[in-house]
Amino acid sequence: MEIRLASDIQTDSIVDGEGIRCVLWTQGCIHNCKGCHNPHTHSFSEGHLVDIEEIKQQILEASSYHDGITFSGGDPMCQASQCLEIAKFCKENEINVWCYTGYTYEELITRSKTNKKILELLKNIDDKLVFSSDGDAIWVCRNCGHVVVGKNAPEVCPICNHPQAY
């Protein structure tokens, strides 16, 4: 399997997550966010294809001095299957995984109905960042619809006791 990257893997980032990180700059994004720092990563035909096994090897070689891997881009969720394979490899090797995406949580849940790899990828991202927010956010229980406003989603819904779910 191959992944389309905007550039070679970066193994020394100190601004794309906690500590020193490897960064995979995925190629392809549909958002066109105003003020995007990486507009050159939007095209789905530019960049270059890299075999995922080669990426895994580079991550493993750098793992002795970095604190984890960050998927960025472009939007990694546009290549969920490829990023999932890499994320699973990282988890198997106890390597921390972060992901930056332009999708909201709600959009990811909607997209996951037609692409199950998105849910699998979310389950392989560390630090429960999917269930936290810098400011207050609205969290809706997927079982009963109860709404909670706050920085973190509750571990268990206070109404129906349904566990936090992707």
Image (spheres, rainbow, N blue to C red):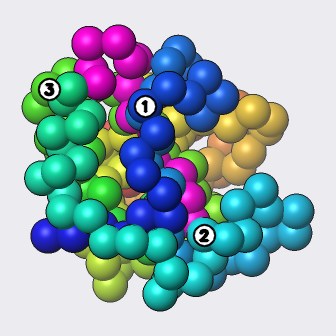
Along the line of sight, which residue is nearer the eye, 134 or 65?
65
Mark 3 and mark 2 lie on one chain; the one further toward the N terminus is 2
x, y percent for residue 78: 44, 73
Check disc 1: other Cα within 10 Å, few if <14, some if 14-19, many if 20+. Answer: many
Residue drawn at the location 31% of the way across and 57% of the way down: 83
Q: In this rendering, would 104 be left or right of 34?
A: left
Residue wearing tag 2: 41
Residue wearing tag 3: 93
Residue drawn at the location 40% of the way across and 17% of the way down: 67
Kind of element beneath mark 1:
strand
Along the line of sight, which residue is nearer the eye, 158 or 83?
83
Q: In this rendering, would 132 be left or right of 48?
A: right
Query: For the residues marked 3 and 1, what is the alpha-carbon distance in whole angstroms?
Result: 17 Å
Residue wearing tag 1: 11
Amino acid type at image mark 1: Thr
x, y percent for residue 112: 37, 73
Q: Are marks 1 and 2 in contact (CB under 8 Å)?
A: no
Check disc 2: other Cα within 10 Å, few if <14, some if 14-19, many if 20+. Answer: many
Mark 1 and mark 2 lie on one chain; the one further toward the N terminus is 1
